[in-house]
Image (tube, grey):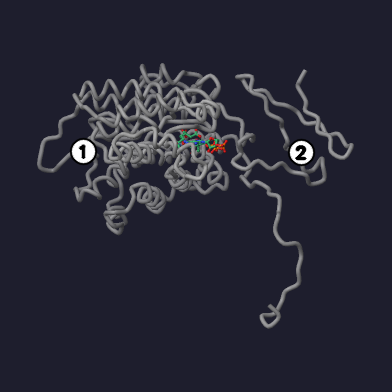
Amino acid sequence: MSKKATLEIDGNKYEFPIIEGTEKELGIDIKTLRSATGGITTIDPGYKNTGSCESGITFLDGEKGILRYRGYSIEELAEKADFLEVAYLLIFGELPTAEQLDKFDKDIKEESHVDEDMKRILDGFPKSAHPMGVLSSLTSALIAFNPGSVDVDSEEAMYNAIVKIMAKFPVLAAWTMRKRKSLPLDYGDNALGYVENLHKMMFSRPNKTYEANKIVNDALDKLLILHADHEQNCSTSTVRIVGSSHAGLFASLSAGISALWGPLHGGANQAVIEMLEAIKEDGGDTAKYIAKAKDKEDSFRLMGFGHRVYKNFDPRAKIIKASAEEVLGDLGIEDPVLDIAKGLAKVALEDEYFVKRKLYPNVDFYSGIIYRALGIPTEMFTVMFALGRLPGWIAQWREMRLRKEPIGRPRQIYIGETYRPFKSVSER
Ligand code: SDX
């Protein structure tokens, strides 16, 4: 028997179906609320209690710290899969066979060139431009060079747009980094795997032989997997709502990159390192920064702490913390900032303010420490997040289009002036 919710307003009762997901989550289906009640809506700033869609891509349990992509645990995927496999899984719903993966890889490699005129667009930016702003602009500019990627109603047209952006996005991301270092813009090497090629595009130098490092590439591959999707977070919801107007995949992704840039979202990984560096410069006085984070008069937040969904440890933070210690050890790097991070986390996790609010380290708390160990500049950290999140954004956009979801258009409760007649300037 399906569950129902009853709402009573001014003595009138209204019934709404309750839908149950495959993980027993319950949602009150209020699709008929306005029509049934004569115009009453709900209000939920930040959508803390509102589901925007039904999705079969990623499952989170915030209380238990569970994260699964298409039913596979993040722990297993991080340990046993590679990033391109996980990208295929997220986008198409199944782990690929060897043949499917080989075709996906080949189709992507076929599209790994970027129109040379795109370099002129990049040239227009000052070297000081933040890479996330540049990447968002270049992703949108790609549309002009790939007009067939916009109106993609057929699955084939969608697939072509997907392999194009999977191929060109890493090139653009590498170019944003190279532009800041005044390095030539190249295309890497199609003989390499997806992540190895990304690393080579980022770090190759014209005057010396590039040497791949397995520890580095394995760590990068794992980080990209850990960032690949996270259900209806801010940037993914942005990609879905922009895509719901049929604006096209690249335009939707460009909007998602801008949403991810914010320090409350993906930009936190850069903000965490800047915070840890400030604490180090300040003599490592973690107590002072914990006090600042708790002080309501102080806008300072403990960056990398807290999460809208996880009210327990973010499972990704656990894996990244262990990986950070392993990578730094393997590379023989002593980074005092890791010790400051661990000390800060220890104090916070024992402090009533954080315990009461269930604030734990999230995915961004330790990731920057690994990026730094891999030689990635701080201002590129959120670009790395975007590179990981790309297949998740694509998967969510594709699901929204295949399910023919309606255009996203929330309602509001108006709290402004009621009707008033116009006043001429002499009357004001
Ligand atoms: C990501 O959604 C996703 O899935 C995102 C993400 C993904 O993979 O896509 O997981 C990636 O964005 C991770 C989050 C990265 N952001 C940060 O690390 C920035 C610092 N964290 C916060 O700003 C905050 O915790 C959020 C934005 C992550 C969540 O904010 P919420 O859910 O809106 O919670 P809130 O701001 O209402 O906070 C509840 C309380 C408040 O105190 P009270 O008003 O109850 O007294 O907790 C406090 C907040 O002041 N609080 C913090 C805090 N985070 C929340 N206090 C100090 N430091 C913090 N970091």
Regarding mark 1 in the picture, which secondary structure is present there?
A: helix
Instruction: Give me the disc on residue 324.
Output: none
Location of mark 1 (residue): 203
* Between 93 and 253, the one nearer to me in the picture: 253
Type of amino acid under label 1: Phe
Location of mark 2 (residue): 32
Query: Farthest residue toward the right?
Result: 11
Residue 189: horizontal and vertical position, in percent? 22, 35
Type of amino acid under label 2: Thr
Residue 152: horizontal and vertical position, in percent? 50, 43
**Mark 1: is the Cβ under 8 angstroms from ligand 1?**
no
Query: Farthest residue toward the bottom?
Result: 426
Label 1 neighbourhood size at 10 Å, few (<14), some (14-19), many (20+)?
A: some
Q: Quadrant of residue 167?
A: top left
Q: Earlier in the sequence, mark 1 or mark 2?
A: 2
Residue 227: horizontal and vertical position, in percent? 41, 31
